[in-house]
Image (spheres, grey):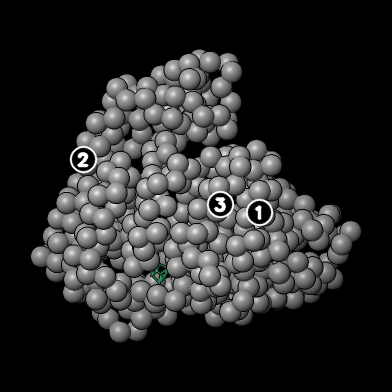
Amino acid sequence: MEKAGAAYKVHIETFGCQMNEYDTELVRSLLKAKGFAFTEDRECADVVLMNTCAIREHAHNKVYGHLADLKALKRQRKLVIGVLGCMAQNLKEELTETVPIVDVLAGPDSYRRLPDLLTGAIAAQEKGDVQRGIAVDLSEYETYQDIMPEQATGITAWIAVMRGCDNFCTFCVVPYTRGRERSRAPQGIIREVEHLAAQGYKQITLLGQNVNSYRFEDWDFARLITAVADVPGIERVRFTSPHPKDFPPALLDAVAGHPRICKHIHLPLQVGNDRILRLMGRTYSRKEYLDLVEDIRRRRDDIALTTDIICGFCTETEEEFLDTYLTVQEVGYHAAFIFKYSERKNTIAARKYQDDVSERIKSNRVTRLVELQKAISLRKNRSMIGQTVRVLVEGDAKKSSDQWMGRTDTNITAVWEKRDAGTHPGDFTPIKISHVSATTVFGDELPAR
Ligand code: SF4
């Protein structure tokens, strides 16, 4: 396959979180090393891989939709289909029984086996046979420490510093699909950051399912993020997703004090009611969470906070939902990802609790919270009108190639007209904010100071 692999074009579709985006880059590196080529066009691919997410119902349904499309394609011509990631891990029986077109299943800890599994499936298909390859063993050790992922943007890069999760929140499938927590050696991470800095990357996002529980020998996350931010050439360091239980003072000091660690903390609340927090296994109370918010704000009141919220978890009453609503109001997040609870197979909640809040009530709660959050985001963005912010230029704006898009240190999207021919993606530039929406600030580029 070393040579023959080059003849085979792989198309990869990625669903879900940033960790999955990162894993797709890992997979590309592993396949490239074995001679596979890649295509953006599914129609001319020999292999279609779907890197899947089992956390959200929407991503889950989308994968099944794409598999239905691929079924038609596979009827017309030879095609190897692989499902990677959390759905491969969590739904292997369902997928192998109900979707016979799937040739390869590989869970998040089994990507090193993927080139061989694909080679076997391709070879069998050439002979008119079917060879199904399944690799879904969870590992206590796999961190892909030695694999340098393919990074696509040239400006911002992600680095997985730990994998897995030991928290077992009752609604979450991650501990079952991605296994136990394990952290990469800091030396390898720093080498990767240095390599990226040498290629001109400006921003690094440290990733992990529970990123701030990073621990390797006597290194904790505060020490790691500081070391990464100290790498010459790296101008911004972000991290996601943390758990509110793992914010020691040293980490808060690092975020507040280091000029290259971004002033943005994603702090998943999930709900603001103590009984539901206990049912979810979140290990903090509403008060402990609010104390942490106060601690952050006491250090620096310009740190932007964002969060994740679940509406309609098992047995949640209207009164309990209102505790969440009031908490969102009290904290005043810059943005929030708000979802309806949807039961995930094999989780503790699926085994122990009744998913008894109706879809209508869940949707109603989501709508009310989204409206509230929109008003808060708009108010916060309006308070920035007239300010000049330093923005990292990422590329063309989504709606027009006559405009640039970039992000502030606090991770707010900025959009402005292209005027200065000297501006390029990867530059830092000052933008004076003139008007805003709930999600974006708009303005004019000033001459660089
Ligand atoms: S901390 Fe909880 S929600 Fe986050 S990945 Fe772990 S189990 Fe899932």
Name the residue that disc number 1 marks: 192
Q: Which residue occupies the extreme bottom position in the image?
A: 352
In primary-sequence order, the first of circles 2 and 1 is 1
Name the residue that disc number 3 marks: 228
Kindly indicate the quadrant of the structure image that contains residue 311: bottom left
In primary-sequence order, the first of circles 1 and 3 is 1
Q: Is residue 68 above or below residue 94?
A: above
Amino acid on which disc 1 is placed: Glu
Task: Write the residue at 21% across / 40% down.
Answer: 375
Circle 2 or circle 1, nearest the eye:
1
Residue 375: assigned label: 2
Q: Position of residue 361 (x, y in %)?
A: 19, 62
Q: Secondary structure at mark 3?
A: helix
Q: Secondary structure at mark 2?
A: helix
Q: Is residue 158 above or below residue 287?
A: above
Q: Secondary structure at mark 1?
A: helix
Mark 2 Cα within 10 Å, few/some/many (few <14, many 20+)?
some
Amino acid on which disc 3 is placed: Val
In primary-sequence order, the first of circles 3 and 2 is 3
Q: Position of residue 148 (x, y in %)?
A: 69, 56
Between 134 and 2, the one nearer to me in the picture: 2
Ligand 1 is found in the corner quadrant, namely bottom left
Amino acid on which disc 2 is placed: Ala
Task: Write the residue at 58% across / 16% down.
Answer: 421
Circle 3 or circle 2, nearest the eye:
3
Q: Is residue 419 visible?
A: yes
Q: Position of residue 117 (x, y in %)?
A: 74, 71
Q: CA distance from mark 1 to mark 3?
A: 10 Å
Task: Write the residue at 36% across / 81% down.
Answer: 348
Q: CA distance from mark 2 to mark 1?
A: 40 Å
Between 145 and 281, the one nearer to me in the picture: 145
